[in-house]
Image (tube, grey):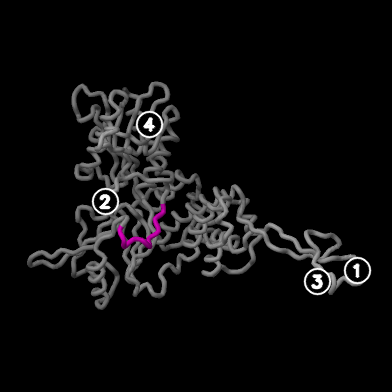
Amino acid sequence: MKITIPVNHNYYEEAPIHESVLGVAFGVNKSGIKNVQNLFSSLHELKLGSEQLKQIKLFSFKKSSFFEPDEERLILKLYSKEKLEKEKQYFVQTGLYAGTLFYKGCKINITSNHGDVFLKRMLNFVNDIYIDNEQVKAKKDETVNQFLFIIAYLFIQSLEKAAVLGLPQEYKTQRERSHKVRGAIDFNAYLKQDIPFQGKLTSVFKERSYVQEIIDVLYLTLRKLESLFGKEIHNRLLGVNQLLKQNYSGRYVTNDTIRKAKLHPSINNPLYSSFKKVLDYAEIILLENDLMSDDSNSNMSTTGYLFDIAELFELYIEKLLNKNFNEWSVNAQQQIDIYKHKFYMRSMFPDIVMKNRDNNKIAVFDAKFKKMEMINKDVDRNDLHQIHSYSGYYKTEIITAGLLFPLSNEINIEKSHSDSLYGLVGNKIKFLIDGVYINDKLSMKELIQKEEEFIERIGAALNNY
Protein backbone atom coordinates (compact mmCIF):
# COMPACT_ATOMS: atom_id res chain seq x y z
CA MET A 1 0.00 0.00 0.00
CA LYS A 2 1.27 3.47 -0.87
CA ILE A 3 0.17 6.94 0.25
CA THR A 4 1.39 10.09 -1.52
CA ILE A 5 0.68 13.46 0.09
CA PRO A 6 2.27 16.93 -0.08
CA VAL A 7 3.98 18.72 2.79
CA ASN A 8 2.00 21.16 4.93
CA HIS A 9 -1.21 19.38 3.98
CA ASN A 10 -4.72 19.67 5.40
CA TYR A 11 -3.89 22.09 8.24
CA TYR A 12 -7.49 23.31 8.39
CA GLU A 13 -8.99 19.86 7.82
CA GLU A 14 -10.13 21.11 4.45
CA ALA A 15 -9.56 17.78 2.68
CA PRO A 16 -11.32 14.95 4.56
CA ILE A 17 -11.44 11.49 3.01
CA HIS A 18 -14.92 9.99 3.31
CA GLU A 19 -15.22 6.35 4.28
CA SER A 20 -17.13 5.51 1.10
CA VAL A 21 -14.12 6.47 -1.07
CA LEU A 22 -11.37 5.19 1.24
CA GLY A 23 -10.40 2.38 -1.14
CA VAL A 24 -10.18 4.71 -4.15
CA ALA A 25 -8.18 7.32 -2.22
CA PHE A 26 -5.53 4.81 -1.18
CA GLY A 27 -5.65 2.57 -4.24
CA VAL A 28 -6.76 -0.60 -2.44
CA ASN A 29 -9.57 -3.10 -2.98
CA LYS A 30 -12.24 -4.01 -0.42
CA SER A 31 -9.96 -6.41 1.43
CA GLY A 32 -7.31 -3.68 1.74
CA ILE A 33 -9.65 -1.10 3.29
CA LYS A 34 -9.31 -2.79 6.67
CA ASN A 35 -5.53 -2.31 6.48
CA VAL A 36 -6.03 1.39 5.80
CA GLN A 37 -8.33 1.73 8.79
CA ASN A 38 -5.82 -0.11 10.99
CA LEU A 39 -3.07 2.23 9.79
CA PHE A 40 -5.07 5.27 10.89
CA SER A 41 -5.68 3.78 14.31
CA SER A 42 -2.10 2.56 14.94
CA LEU A 43 0.18 5.25 13.49
CA HIS A 44 -1.84 8.31 14.47
CA GLU A 45 0.88 10.96 14.91
CA LEU A 46 4.61 11.26 14.27
CA LYS A 47 6.67 14.14 15.64
CA LEU A 48 10.35 14.93 15.45
CA GLY A 49 12.26 13.54 18.42
CA SER A 50 9.72 10.89 19.37
CA GLU A 51 10.87 7.40 20.35
CA GLN A 52 9.04 5.99 17.36
CA LEU A 53 11.31 7.84 14.93
CA LYS A 54 14.71 6.60 16.12
CA GLN A 55 15.25 4.71 12.86
CA ILE A 56 14.32 7.66 10.66
CA LYS A 57 17.27 9.32 8.91
CA LEU A 58 16.82 13.10 8.96
CA PHE A 59 18.91 15.08 6.48
CA SER A 60 19.70 18.73 7.05
CA PHE A 61 20.83 21.49 4.69
CA LYS A 62 22.26 23.58 7.52
CA LYS A 63 25.06 22.90 9.98
CA SER A 64 22.57 23.48 12.78
CA SER A 65 18.91 24.30 13.07
CA PHE A 66 17.37 26.53 15.69
CA PHE A 67 14.01 25.81 17.25
CA GLU A 68 12.65 25.64 20.74
CA PRO A 69 12.91 22.21 22.39
CA ASP A 70 9.19 22.16 23.05
CA GLU A 71 8.24 23.47 19.59
CA GLU A 72 5.88 21.15 17.76
CA ARG A 73 7.58 19.59 14.75
CA LEU A 74 4.83 17.58 13.10
CA ILE A 75 5.80 15.08 10.44
CA LEU A 76 2.61 13.11 9.87
CA LYS A 77 -0.76 12.73 11.55
CA LEU A 78 -3.48 10.23 10.64
CA TYR A 79 -6.82 10.29 12.42
CA SER A 80 -10.54 9.86 11.87
CA LYS A 81 -13.73 11.53 13.08
CA GLU A 82 -17.25 10.22 13.39
CA LYS A 83 -20.19 12.57 12.96
CA LEU A 84 -23.73 11.75 14.00
CA GLU A 85 -25.73 10.18 11.19
CA LYS A 86 -22.83 10.78 8.78
CA GLU A 87 -20.13 8.49 7.50
CA LYS A 88 -16.73 8.48 9.17
CA GLN A 89 -14.14 10.90 7.82
CA TYR A 90 -10.39 10.25 7.65
CA PHE A 91 -7.75 12.98 7.80
CA VAL A 92 -4.08 13.09 6.79
CA GLN A 93 -2.02 16.04 8.01
CA THR A 94 1.65 16.72 7.29
CA GLY A 95 4.22 19.18 8.58
CA LEU A 96 7.24 20.57 6.78
CA TYR A 97 9.24 17.36 6.37
CA ALA A 98 9.34 15.70 2.97
CA GLY A 99 10.64 12.24 2.18
CA THR A 100 9.64 8.60 2.43
CA LEU A 101 8.39 6.63 5.44
CA PHE A 102 7.72 2.91 5.79
CA TYR A 103 5.31 1.56 8.38
CA LYS A 104 3.63 -1.86 8.55
CA GLY A 105 4.04 -2.51 4.84
CA CYS A 106 2.83 0.97 3.88
CA LYS A 107 5.02 3.34 1.91
CA ILE A 108 4.23 6.98 2.68
CA ASN A 109 5.65 9.56 0.26
CA ILE A 110 5.55 13.16 1.52
CA THR A 111 6.36 15.39 -1.44
CA SER A 112 7.00 19.03 -2.23
CA ASN A 113 3.75 20.57 -3.43
CA HIS A 114 5.33 23.11 -5.80
CA GLY A 115 6.76 20.86 -8.51
CA ASP A 116 10.21 19.72 -9.54
CA VAL A 117 11.22 23.01 -11.19
CA PHE A 118 11.00 24.95 -7.94
CA LEU A 119 12.63 22.14 -5.99
CA LYS A 120 15.59 22.10 -8.37
CA ARG A 121 15.81 25.89 -8.29
CA MET A 122 16.07 25.92 -4.49
CA LEU A 123 18.71 23.22 -4.62
CA ASN A 124 20.66 25.18 -7.20
CA PHE A 125 20.89 28.11 -4.82
CA VAL A 126 21.76 25.99 -1.80
CA ASN A 127 24.44 23.84 -3.45
CA ASP A 128 25.40 25.87 -6.51
CA ILE A 129 24.93 22.79 -8.70
CA TYR A 130 22.96 23.23 -11.92
CA ILE A 131 20.99 20.38 -13.45
CA ASP A 132 17.96 22.39 -14.49
CA ASN A 133 18.42 22.50 -18.25
CA GLU A 134 15.80 20.93 -20.49
CA GLN A 135 18.08 18.04 -21.49
CA VAL A 136 17.95 16.50 -18.03
CA LYS A 137 15.24 13.85 -17.94
CA ALA A 138 14.37 11.93 -14.81
CA LYS A 139 12.39 8.73 -14.52
CA LYS A 140 8.61 8.95 -14.36
CA ASP A 141 8.07 8.07 -10.70
CA GLU A 142 7.82 11.66 -9.50
CA THR A 143 7.22 10.78 -5.84
CA VAL A 144 10.55 8.95 -5.62
CA ASN A 145 12.19 11.33 -8.07
CA GLN A 146 11.72 14.35 -5.78
CA PHE A 147 13.47 12.60 -2.92
CA LEU A 148 16.26 11.41 -5.20
CA PHE A 149 16.77 14.99 -6.38
CA ILE A 150 17.50 15.96 -2.78
CA ILE A 151 19.80 13.02 -2.05
CA ALA A 152 21.58 13.46 -5.39
CA TYR A 153 22.40 17.07 -4.60
CA LEU A 154 23.50 16.25 -1.07
CA PHE A 155 25.66 13.38 -2.33
CA ILE A 156 27.36 15.49 -4.98
CA GLN A 157 27.89 18.46 -2.68
CA SER A 158 29.38 16.31 0.09
CA LEU A 159 31.55 14.30 -2.33
CA GLU A 160 32.89 17.49 -3.89
CA LYS A 161 33.94 18.81 -0.48
CA ALA A 162 35.28 15.49 0.82
CA ALA A 163 37.36 14.81 -2.30
CA VAL A 164 39.34 18.04 -1.94
CA LEU A 165 41.83 16.13 0.25
CA GLY A 166 41.71 13.05 -1.98
CA LEU A 167 39.84 9.76 -2.00
CA PRO A 168 40.33 7.36 0.95
CA GLN A 169 43.55 5.35 0.78
CA GLU A 170 45.14 2.55 2.77
CA TYR A 171 48.51 0.81 2.92
CA LYS A 172 48.57 -2.58 1.19
CA THR A 173 51.36 -5.13 1.05
CA GLN A 174 52.62 -5.58 -2.50
CA ARG A 175 54.97 -8.20 -3.98
CA GLU A 176 57.08 -7.46 -7.04
CA ARG A 177 59.67 -9.49 -8.92
CA SER A 178 62.07 -7.26 -10.85
CA HIS A 179 65.67 -6.09 -11.27
CA LYS A 180 65.10 -3.42 -8.60
CA VAL A 181 64.45 -3.93 -4.91
CA ARG A 182 61.62 -2.03 -3.24
CA GLY A 183 61.19 -2.50 0.50
CA ALA A 184 62.45 -5.85 1.81
CA ILE A 185 63.70 -8.91 -0.09
CA ASP A 186 61.48 -11.98 0.20
CA PHE A 187 64.17 -14.51 1.22
CA ASN A 188 61.83 -17.50 0.99
CA ALA A 189 61.14 -16.64 -2.64
CA TYR A 190 64.89 -16.03 -3.17
CA LEU A 191 65.79 -19.49 -1.88
CA LYS A 192 63.08 -21.15 -3.99
CA GLN A 193 63.42 -19.20 -7.24
CA ASP A 194 66.67 -17.27 -7.42
CA ILE A 195 69.43 -19.82 -6.83
CA PRO A 196 71.34 -19.63 -8.99
CA PHE A 197 70.73 -15.86 -9.22
CA GLN A 198 69.16 -14.81 -12.53
CA GLY A 199 69.16 -11.03 -12.10
CA LYS A 200 65.68 -10.64 -10.57
CA LEU A 201 64.56 -10.57 -6.94
CA THR A 202 61.16 -10.69 -5.25
CA SER A 203 60.64 -7.77 -2.89
CA VAL A 204 57.83 -6.99 -0.47
CA PHE A 205 56.76 -3.42 0.23
CA LYS A 206 53.79 -1.40 1.42
CA GLU A 207 52.11 1.02 -0.94
CA ARG A 208 49.22 3.43 -0.56
CA SER A 209 46.25 2.52 -2.71
CA TYR A 210 42.63 3.53 -2.95
CA VAL A 211 40.09 1.60 -0.87
CA GLN A 212 38.43 -0.57 -3.51
CA GLU A 213 35.03 -0.89 -1.83
CA ILE A 214 34.71 2.88 -1.46
CA ILE A 215 35.83 3.47 -5.05
CA ASP A 216 33.27 0.98 -6.37
CA VAL A 217 30.40 2.41 -4.28
CA LEU A 218 31.12 6.00 -5.32
CA TYR A 219 31.62 5.15 -8.99
CA LEU A 220 28.40 3.16 -9.33
CA THR A 221 26.46 5.83 -7.43
CA LEU A 222 27.55 8.40 -10.01
CA ARG A 223 26.60 6.00 -12.81
CA LYS A 224 23.13 5.53 -11.35
CA LEU A 225 22.61 9.28 -10.97
CA GLU A 226 23.79 9.75 -14.55
CA SER A 227 21.22 7.22 -15.77
CA LEU A 228 18.46 9.02 -13.87
CA PHE A 229 19.31 12.69 -14.43
CA GLY A 230 21.85 12.83 -17.26
CA LYS A 231 25.57 13.58 -17.31
CA GLU A 232 25.01 17.16 -16.15
CA ILE A 233 24.38 15.81 -12.64
CA HIS A 234 28.13 15.54 -11.97
CA ASN A 235 29.58 18.42 -13.97
CA ARG A 236 31.30 19.65 -10.82
CA LEU A 237 32.99 16.27 -10.30
CA LEU A 238 34.65 15.59 -13.66
CA GLY A 239 38.10 15.05 -12.13
CA VAL A 240 36.78 12.82 -9.36
CA ASN A 241 34.58 10.93 -11.81
CA GLN A 242 37.57 10.20 -14.07
CA LEU A 243 39.66 9.00 -11.12
CA LEU A 244 36.86 6.71 -9.96
CA LYS A 245 36.47 5.32 -13.48
CA GLN A 246 40.20 4.53 -13.72
CA ASN A 247 40.22 2.66 -10.41
CA TYR A 248 36.82 0.92 -10.60
CA SER A 249 37.14 -2.85 -10.15
CA GLY A 250 34.42 -3.68 -12.67
CA ARG A 251 32.44 -5.58 -10.05
CA TYR A 252 28.81 -4.87 -9.18
CA VAL A 253 28.22 -3.42 -5.72
CA THR A 254 26.33 -5.61 -3.24
CA ASN A 255 24.95 -4.86 0.22
CA ASP A 256 28.13 -6.42 1.62
CA THR A 257 30.29 -4.06 -0.47
CA ILE A 258 28.40 -1.05 0.87
CA ARG A 259 28.72 -2.33 4.43
CA LYS A 260 32.49 -2.83 4.06
CA ALA A 261 32.87 0.64 2.55
CA LYS A 262 30.98 2.29 5.43
CA LEU A 263 32.92 0.34 8.08
CA HIS A 264 36.36 0.63 6.51
CA PRO A 265 38.99 1.88 9.02
CA SER A 266 40.27 4.53 6.61
CA ILE A 267 37.23 6.78 7.10
CA ASN A 268 38.02 6.98 10.81
CA ASN A 269 41.07 8.97 9.75
CA PRO A 270 40.19 12.69 10.21
CA LEU A 271 41.49 13.24 6.69
CA TYR A 272 38.69 11.10 5.26
CA SER A 273 35.99 11.31 7.95
CA SER A 274 33.74 13.45 5.75
CA PHE A 275 33.26 10.41 3.49
CA LYS A 276 30.99 8.88 6.15
CA LYS A 277 28.17 11.21 5.10
CA VAL A 278 28.99 10.69 1.41
CA LEU A 279 28.62 6.93 1.80
CA ASP A 280 25.34 7.34 3.69
CA TYR A 281 23.90 9.22 0.71
CA ALA A 282 25.40 6.70 -1.72
CA GLU A 283 23.73 3.83 0.14
CA ILE A 284 20.30 5.44 -0.20
CA ILE A 285 20.80 6.09 -3.92
CA LEU A 286 22.07 2.59 -4.71
CA LEU A 287 19.42 0.80 -2.63
CA GLU A 288 16.55 3.10 -3.61
CA ASN A 289 14.60 0.21 -5.12
CA ASP A 290 15.17 -1.97 -2.05
CA LEU A 291 14.32 0.42 0.76
CA MET A 292 11.65 -1.86 2.18
CA SER A 293 13.18 -4.95 3.71
CA ASP A 294 11.54 -8.36 3.38
CA ASP A 295 10.33 -8.25 6.96
CA SER A 296 8.91 -4.72 6.72
CA ASN A 297 5.35 -5.94 7.03
CA SER A 298 6.05 -7.42 10.43
CA ASN A 299 8.30 -4.65 11.64
CA MET A 300 6.46 -2.38 14.06
CA SER A 301 9.07 0.37 13.86
CA THR A 302 8.91 3.28 11.45
CA THR A 303 11.82 3.66 9.05
CA GLY A 304 12.59 6.03 6.22
CA TYR A 305 14.28 9.24 5.15
CA LEU A 306 13.18 12.83 5.69
CA PHE A 307 14.44 16.34 5.00
CA ASP A 308 13.21 19.70 6.25
CA ILE A 309 11.83 21.47 3.19
CA ALA A 310 11.19 24.63 5.23
CA GLU A 311 14.92 24.77 5.95
CA LEU A 312 15.61 24.43 2.22
CA PHE A 313 13.24 27.31 1.48
CA GLU A 314 14.91 29.51 4.11
CA LEU A 315 18.31 28.93 2.52
CA TYR A 316 16.91 29.64 -0.93
CA ILE A 317 15.44 32.99 0.16
CA GLU A 318 18.64 33.89 2.05
CA LYS A 319 20.85 33.24 -0.97
CA LEU A 320 18.41 34.90 -3.36
CA LEU A 321 18.57 38.10 -1.30
CA ASN A 322 22.33 37.86 -0.81
CA LYS A 323 22.85 37.45 -4.55
CA ASN A 324 20.80 40.52 -5.46
CA PHE A 325 21.60 43.05 -2.72
CA ASN A 326 25.36 43.58 -2.70
CA GLU A 327 25.11 46.73 -0.59
CA TRP A 328 23.51 44.73 2.22
CA SER A 329 24.97 41.99 4.39
CA VAL A 330 22.55 39.08 4.69
CA ASN A 331 22.77 36.98 7.86
CA ALA A 332 20.74 33.87 8.58
CA GLN A 333 19.54 32.68 11.99
CA GLN A 334 21.24 35.55 13.80
CA GLN A 335 20.98 34.93 17.53
CA ILE A 336 19.21 37.59 19.60
CA ASP A 337 19.57 37.23 23.37
CA ILE A 338 16.93 39.02 25.42
CA TYR A 339 16.88 39.55 29.20
CA LYS A 340 20.47 38.48 29.66
CA HIS A 341 21.44 37.31 33.17
CA LYS A 342 17.77 36.87 34.13
CA PHE A 343 16.18 33.50 34.86
CA TYR A 344 13.73 34.12 32.00
CA MET A 345 16.47 34.83 29.45
CA ARG A 346 15.58 33.70 25.94
CA SER A 347 17.24 33.54 22.54
CA MET A 348 15.46 34.41 19.30
CA PHE A 349 16.59 33.48 15.80
CA PRO A 350 15.11 35.53 12.94
CA ASP A 351 15.55 33.71 9.66
CA ILE A 352 17.11 36.65 7.80
CA VAL A 353 18.63 39.91 9.03
CA MET A 354 19.83 42.36 6.36
CA LYS A 355 22.13 45.22 7.33
CA ASN A 356 23.00 48.11 5.04
CA ARG A 357 26.78 48.43 4.75
CA ASP A 358 26.65 52.24 4.47
CA ASN A 359 24.14 53.40 7.08
CA ASN A 360 23.61 50.27 9.28
CA LYS A 361 19.87 50.26 8.64
CA ILE A 362 18.25 46.86 9.19
CA ALA A 363 15.56 44.74 7.58
CA VAL A 364 14.37 41.54 9.23
CA PHE A 365 12.41 38.72 7.57
CA ASP A 366 11.10 35.27 8.43
CA ALA A 367 10.79 32.75 5.59
CA LYS A 368 7.76 30.48 5.92
CA PHE A 369 7.23 27.47 3.71
CA LYS A 370 3.48 27.49 4.13
CA LYS A 371 0.46 27.89 1.90
CA MET A 372 -0.09 31.52 1.00
CA GLU A 373 -3.09 32.39 -1.18
CA MET A 374 -3.14 35.98 0.10
CA ILE A 375 -6.08 35.39 2.43
CA ASN A 376 -6.26 36.21 6.14
CA LYS A 377 -6.24 32.67 7.53
CA ASP A 378 -2.97 31.85 5.75
CA VAL A 379 -1.09 34.25 8.04
CA ASP A 380 -0.41 32.34 11.25
CA ARG A 381 -0.97 34.40 14.40
CA ASN A 382 2.27 33.14 16.00
CA ASP A 383 4.30 33.99 12.89
CA LEU A 384 2.86 37.50 12.86
CA HIS A 385 3.63 38.05 16.55
CA GLN A 386 7.13 36.64 16.17
CA ILE A 387 8.20 38.95 13.36
CA HIS A 388 6.85 41.96 15.26
CA SER A 389 8.92 40.86 18.28
CA TYR A 390 12.05 40.92 16.13
CA SER A 391 11.09 44.35 14.83
CA GLY A 392 10.78 45.74 18.34
CA TYR A 393 14.26 44.51 19.27
CA TYR A 394 16.03 46.53 16.56
CA LYS A 395 14.39 49.84 17.60
CA THR A 396 15.37 52.80 15.42
CA GLU A 397 17.73 50.87 13.13
CA ILE A 398 14.99 48.83 11.49
CA ILE A 399 13.30 50.08 8.34
CA THR A 400 11.49 47.00 7.02
CA ALA A 401 10.13 43.72 8.39
CA GLY A 402 8.06 40.97 6.87
CA LEU A 403 7.10 37.36 6.23
CA LEU A 404 8.21 35.69 2.99
CA PHE A 405 6.35 32.75 1.42
CA PRO A 406 6.12 30.66 -1.74
CA LEU A 407 3.04 32.42 -3.08
CA SER A 408 0.14 30.49 -4.59
CA ASN A 409 -1.47 33.65 -5.98
CA GLU A 410 -0.01 36.71 -7.63
CA ILE A 411 0.65 39.50 -5.16
CA ASN A 412 -1.31 42.72 -4.73
CA ILE A 413 1.10 45.20 -3.13
CA GLU A 414 -1.68 47.46 -1.85
CA LYS A 415 -3.08 44.57 0.19
CA SER A 416 0.17 42.94 1.29
CA HIS A 417 2.58 45.88 1.90
CA SER A 418 2.03 48.33 4.73
CA ASP A 419 3.81 51.69 4.92
CA SER A 420 3.92 51.46 8.72
CA LEU A 421 4.40 48.79 11.37
CA TYR A 422 1.10 47.78 13.00
CA GLY A 423 -0.59 50.06 10.43
CA LEU A 424 -0.06 53.02 12.77
CA VAL A 425 0.09 56.51 11.32
CA GLY A 426 3.49 58.11 11.90
CA ASN A 427 5.38 54.81 12.18
CA LYS A 428 8.00 54.77 9.41
CA ILE A 429 8.87 51.07 9.60
CA LYS A 430 7.45 49.18 6.63
CA PHE A 431 5.81 45.78 7.01
CA LEU A 432 5.13 43.38 4.18
CA ILE A 433 4.00 39.91 3.29
CA ASP A 434 5.64 38.83 0.06
CA GLY A 435 7.52 36.03 -1.66
CA VAL A 436 8.10 34.30 -4.95
CA TYR A 437 5.02 33.26 -6.92
CA ILE A 438 5.15 29.51 -7.57
CA ASN A 439 3.04 26.94 -9.33
CA ASP A 440 3.91 23.53 -10.70
CA LYS A 441 3.34 24.65 -14.30
CA LEU A 442 6.04 27.34 -14.34
CA SER A 443 9.08 26.76 -16.50
CA MET A 444 12.51 27.61 -15.10
CA LYS A 445 12.57 30.78 -17.20
CA GLU A 446 9.19 31.87 -15.84
CA LEU A 447 10.25 31.09 -12.28
CA ILE A 448 13.36 33.24 -12.64
CA GLN A 449 11.12 36.07 -13.88
CA LYS A 450 8.99 35.74 -10.73
CA GLU A 451 12.16 35.91 -8.63
CA GLU A 452 13.13 39.14 -10.35
CA GLU A 453 9.71 40.65 -9.62
CA PHE A 454 10.08 39.64 -5.96
CA ILE A 455 13.56 41.22 -5.75
CA GLU A 456 12.22 44.41 -7.32
CA ARG A 457 9.48 44.67 -4.67
CA ILE A 458 11.92 44.02 -1.81
CA GLY A 459 14.33 46.57 -3.28
CA ALA A 460 11.60 49.21 -3.32
CA ALA A 461 10.77 48.47 0.34
CA LEU A 462 14.44 48.77 1.35
CA ASN A 463 15.24 51.91 -0.61
CA ASN A 464 12.17 54.06 0.00
CA TYR A 465 12.84 55.30 3.53
Circles 1 and 3: CB atoms closer than 8 Å: no
Q: Is residue 320 above or below residue 242?
A: above
Residue 377 position, x and y percent, is 19, 45
> Label 1 is placed on what type of residue?
Phe
Q: Which residue in the protein does label 3 denote?
A: 188
Disc on the earlier residue, 1 or 4: 1
Q: Which residue is mark 2?
A: 72
State the residue in front, 343 or 309: 343
Left or right position of 168 against 62: right
Spatial CA distance of label 3 from label 2 is 70 Å
Comparing labels 2 and 4, the label whose residue is closer to the camera: 2
- Looking at the rendered structure, the kind of residue marked 2 is Glu
Identify the secondary structure beneath mark 2. Answer: loop
Q: Earlier in the sequence, mark 3 or mark 4?
A: 3
Asked whether disc 1 touches disc 4, contact meaning CB atoms under 8 Å apart, the reply is no
Quadrant into which the C terminus falls: top left
Q: Residue farthest to the bottom?
A: 31
**Nearer-the-camera pick, 150 or 189:** 189
Q: Which residue is mark 4?
A: 354
1 vs 3, front mark: 3
- Residue at the spot 90% in from the left edge and 65% down from the top edge: 199
State the residue position of label 1. Answer: 197
Work out whether mark 3 precedes mark 2 in sequence or the reverse, and give the earlier one.
Answer: 2
Mark 2 or 4, nearer chain start: 2
- What residue is at 24 percent from the left and 73 percent from the top? 33
- Tell me how far mark 2 sits from mark 4, CA to CA: 28 Å
Q: Position of residue 174 (x, y in %)?
A: 73, 64
